[in-house]
Image (cartoon, rainbow, N blue to C red):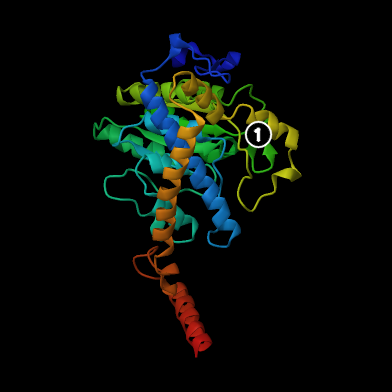
Amino acid sequence: MIEKFDPLKGEMLRILHPDGRLDESLRPDLSDQTIQSLYRQMVLIRLADQKALALQRQGRLGTYAPVIGQEAAQAGSAHALQKADWIFPSFRETGVLYLHGVPLRNIYLYWMGFEMGQKVPSGVNVFPIAVPVGTHPLHAVGAAYAAKQQKEKICTIAYFGDGATSEGDFHEAMNFAGVLNTPTIFFCQNNQYAISVPRKKQTASKTIAQKAIAYGFPGIQVDGNDLLAVYAATREARERAVSGSGPTFIEAVTYRFGPHTTADDPTKYREDAEVEEWKKLDPMLRLQTYLGGKALWNEGLEAKWKMEAGKTLNQAIQEAEAVALPDPEEMFLYTFADLPPSLKEQMEDYLNFLKEKEG
C-alpha cells in the first residue's frame, strides 16, 4: 500500500472519510469491534488530556503538551505495534505511551515534575520522553541498528512533530537509517504548527513525507485524523522493518486543537476560524458516525464510556498525588557515577540553604 501513494504527487492515504464513509477496498484487518475498542481508548486519551489541562490550571501539574485532535494518529499507530517494539517519544505522545503500557499514574507523575514518572514497568519498551526537538530519532535509529545486528525481529518508532523536520538531527537520523537499512519507523505528527511557526514556513516541500525519498526509503502521507489509515500505514511499515526491507517515513496530517503547551497562547498566531474548520475533521466525529451506522455507538454508550474513563483517570491522579516529594539532593544525583566537585559544592550549598531556611 505504501508504494501506491506517491508523496511527490501529493497523494494521501485515507480509508475512513470525514463523513464516516469507509473505503472497503483499502480496509485493514480491523473488525468493527476492534475499531469500537480503539475509539473507547481515544475517549480515555482525550479525557486524560482535559484532566491534565485542568490540573495545570489548578497548579497541580507543570507545563503540559496537549494531545487533543491527534488521538487517531496516536491510537492507530500504537495499535499497529507489537509489545517488543521500542517507542521513542517526543513530549506529545500521551496516547502512545498509555497504549504501549505506561501507566497513567506515571504519565501524570512526569508532568508533575517527578523524574520517577519516566521509570516504566519491566517489559514496557519505551524510552524517556524527549523534550529537545528532533534529537531522539537518532536514538531510535541506533537502537534499531543494534536490534538488526542481534537479529531481533522488532522495530523502533520515533514520534515527532513537523517542526522537528527542520532540525539537523532529524536529517542525520534519516540518513543513517537509509544507509544502514535499519528497522525504523519515522512517525511525524504534522499538526501544522511548530509552536507558532506554521508548516508553510517549515519547508517548501509539497509534503513532508517526500523527504524520505532523498534518503533512499519510502515515505507516505496519511490522513492523521483517520484511525484506519494510520493503522494500515504503520502496520505495513512495521512489516517492512521486521522483514529486513528497512525504514519508512509516515507523515500523519493532523491538527492540534489546543496550544503547543500550557505556556503557549495560540490566538497570537492563528485564527479561530482556522481551528473551527479543522474541528470539522475531528477524528472522534468520523468514528462516531461510522460506529453509529453499525449500532456500535450512541450518546448513551458515549456517556457510559466517559464515566468509566473518568473513574480510571481519577484513580491515576490520586495515586500520582499520593507520591511523596523527592529529596532535594536528587536533582544533583543520577547523572554522573561520581559527582564532579562543582556539582557536589552546589548540592552542599543548596542543602545548607534549606537547613537555614527551616531553622
Pinpoint residue 292: horizontal percent, then vertical percent: 49, 23
Percent across and percent down for residue 323 are 39, 65
The residue drawn where x is 43% and y is 76% is: 344
Q: Quadrant of the N terminus?
A: top left
- Rendered location of residue 340, percent (x, y): 42, 71
Res. 234 image quadrant: top left
- Which residue lies under the disc numbered 1? 202
Counting from the top left corner in percent of width and height, residue 281 is at 61, 26
86 relative to 72 in the view: left or right: left
Q: Is residue 112 left or right of residue 243?
A: right
Near mark 1 (Cα within 10 A), the count class, few <14, some 14-19 or many ≥20, is some
Q: Nearer the viewer, residue 147 or 79?
A: 79
Residue type at tag 1: Gln
Viewer-proximal residue among 60 and 216: 60
Relative to residue 211, is residue 305 depicted above or below?
Answer: below
Rendered image quadrant of residue 56: bottom right
| Image quadrant in which you'd find residue 189 | top right
Asked if one can make out residue 91 in the rendered structure from this viewpoint, the answer is: no
Q: For the point 49% across and 31% down, which residue is it?
A: 72
